[in-house]
Image (cartoon, grey):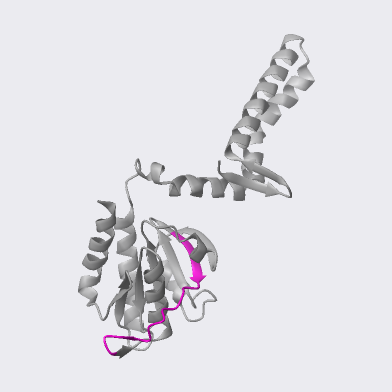
Amino acid sequence: MFEILKIGFLNLTLVDLIDIAIVAVLIFWLLSFITEAINLKAVNWILRTISDIWLLAFIILFQPELRRLLLMITRNPFFRLFVRSKYSETIGEVVETVIELSEKHIGALIVFSRTQNVEMTVETGIPMNAIVSQELLVSIFNPKSPLHDGAVIIDNQLILAARCILPLSSATKFNSKNLGTRHRAGLGLSEQVDSIVIIVSEETGAISIAEGGELTLNIPKEKISTYIRSKLSEKSK
């Protein structure tokens, strides 16, 4: 089962969490019944007070673990069968970002994960787990931002991580054109993982896409949205 928390040799799984919750509820119910039956007013008042604050305290204490649990559940393929993909909204935000960065000649690497897990790539960067927005993406790739140097990983509506390190492709040329580090990084990831990598050139502002070990260079701004949507929809059919 999914591991939620690890303290030394102690591993807390989802089953353990459910087990603890059931026992806690049973003990609380039993104590409440006993104190009310024998009219222990002070103890009963304490139990009622605890019942009002225990949920808030639990959320505060276990916030990182609960976030991790929710992420594991939402990333599960079975869960996604019942949830409509929000990539459509996400693509709109990304396209606007890419066009703005292109016009300002700000370099960027944006990765859309598809059928394969990109956990190893995510672990090389800074965790974000934030909703995709144009404002956030532009601020991440701002040259003055400490997160700008690297790739952003997107899964559905979430920016999983920023400043991620992508594996460089061994290819230094593509169609007789020399490749810079950013293009080699995008191409390198696409060679190893089922993903779509959007590349914005800092030097020229040109927009390119790496997919399946292939590069599509200099995509017109007016076609970038259609191109990305078609590629992502291929894997959702």
Could you tell me which residue is drawn at 63 percent across and 39 percent down?
56
**Percent x, y of residue 39:** 76, 11
Which quadrant would the N terminus be assigned to in this image?
A: top right
**Picture quarter containing residue 228?**
bottom left
The answer to whether 123 is drawn above or below residue 171 in the figure is: above
The answer to whether 48 is drawn above or below residue 151 in the figure is: above
Q: How many marks?
A: 0
Q: Is residue 175 magenta?
A: yes
Q: Is residue 122 left or right of residue 201?
A: right
Q: Is residue 170 left or right of residue 70?
A: left
Give the magenta-colored segment's residue range: 159-176
Q: Is residue 69 left or right of residue 75?
A: right
**Percent x, y of residue 195:** 36, 64
Could you tell me which residue is drawn at 31 percent across and 74 percent down?
209
Residue furthest front as drawn: 170
**Percent x, y of residue 6:** 67, 48
**Picture quarter containing residue 20?**
top right
